[in-house]
Image (tube, rainbow, N blue to C red):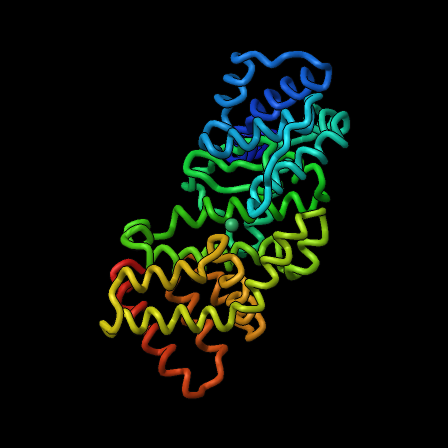
Amino acid sequence: MRNLFFLLFLITSSFTFAQNVDLSSVDEFFKITYKLKNGEEISDNDWNNFEKSKAYAIFTNKYIIDIAKLSIRNVFGSCNINIDNSNNLLKTLVLANYEEINYNYSSLKTFRDNYDFESLIYNAKSRLQSFLMCELDSSVEWKPVYFLFLSKDGQDRDSAIVIDLNLIYKMTEEERINFLAHEFFHVYRAHFEHHEFNYANDINFVIDMIANEGIADQIDKYMGYDQYFSNFGKSKELASEFKQLYNNAPKDIEYLQTTIAQYAANQIDKDTCIDRLIGIYKYNGHALGFYISNQIIKAGLRDEMIKEFHNPYEFFRLYSLTLPKDEKSSLNDDFLLFLKAETELYY
Ligand SMILES: [Zn+2]
């Protein structure tokens, strides 16, 4: 009886965590690059299959897929096409990633064939569960995870989480679990957050995304940007940009609060407000959110932040508790009053 119970437990738990992993984009990439490395021609059909494979289809547009194709030809083909990547971070990142993939080509192929992707997904969910300090709600619908080769990055998209396989390859197992748990946090939070509020306008969207990424970064970047970016060969350009954004965060958050308080007081119109927010909202507000969540944790308010992980008002309210009471407080109060009024309906 006990054994049967255990067996049933195993079956149900594997069902709960059963997840769709798709590697078709990785496989199409290998097909094309293998041919190019052997001096073979790539047919229109090959490129078609490449573009239509699951991860490339949902992750790229014409502009991005052209960068990928040109970079593939450049790195794996015999003819060197000159890619002008001045002032284009994406081109730089894709090209650098593909050069690395070429260098580790056969080990990457072995990794693709042997790595236990299902276990990674299971462990990432366990990690999220311990981060949130509660049982994961069983009604949450998890997204499939699609892999590709593009730039060393991963993102939560509408229909799937899309991750660069070379990024995962370069990481330690612990980093992989944390990375995917970060993406799963977004999926999990989406179940509880209020889309009506978040998508009502760009101001709400920015505020919510800063809270969203700020908490998510505590899963995989809790050791700080310095260590995080030096760990698995992330791009130096990206690292220095993130660090600079982090150093500017206190000022930028103050600017965000001033701007929104001015908008709330009808001193500026909505378009001006949004234009100003766009000026400081970079990379989904990661650095701003991460700075805020670090201050909240330093102030001993981590548990409160985790309890209300879906509520942007609580995120900024907890941050306000970490600020010194000085002349700037009233500005912060105006911002919070506005945010409370805007969110009251939903949270
Ligand atoms: Zn994120």
- Residue at x 26%, y 69% (from the top left corner): 268
Which of these two is toward me, 159 or 262? 262
Residue 10 appears at what percent x and percent y? 59, 32
Left-right relation of 176 to 11? right
Q: Position of residue 228 (x, y in %)?
A: 67, 55
Q: Is residue 1 visible?
A: no
337 to 285, vertically: above or below: below
**Horizontal relation, residue 318 to residue 194: left or right:** right
Above/below status of 95 relative to 106: below
Please provide percent x and percent y for residue 337.
Answer: 30, 74
The residue drawn where x is 41% and y is 83% is 328
Please, is residue 76 above or below residue 157 in the view?
A: above
Q: Which picture quadrant has residue 279?
A: bottom left
> Residue lying furthest left in this view?
266
Quarter holding the N terminus is top right
Q: Is residue 51 visible?
A: yes
Q: Nearer the viewer, residue 207 or 124?
A: 207
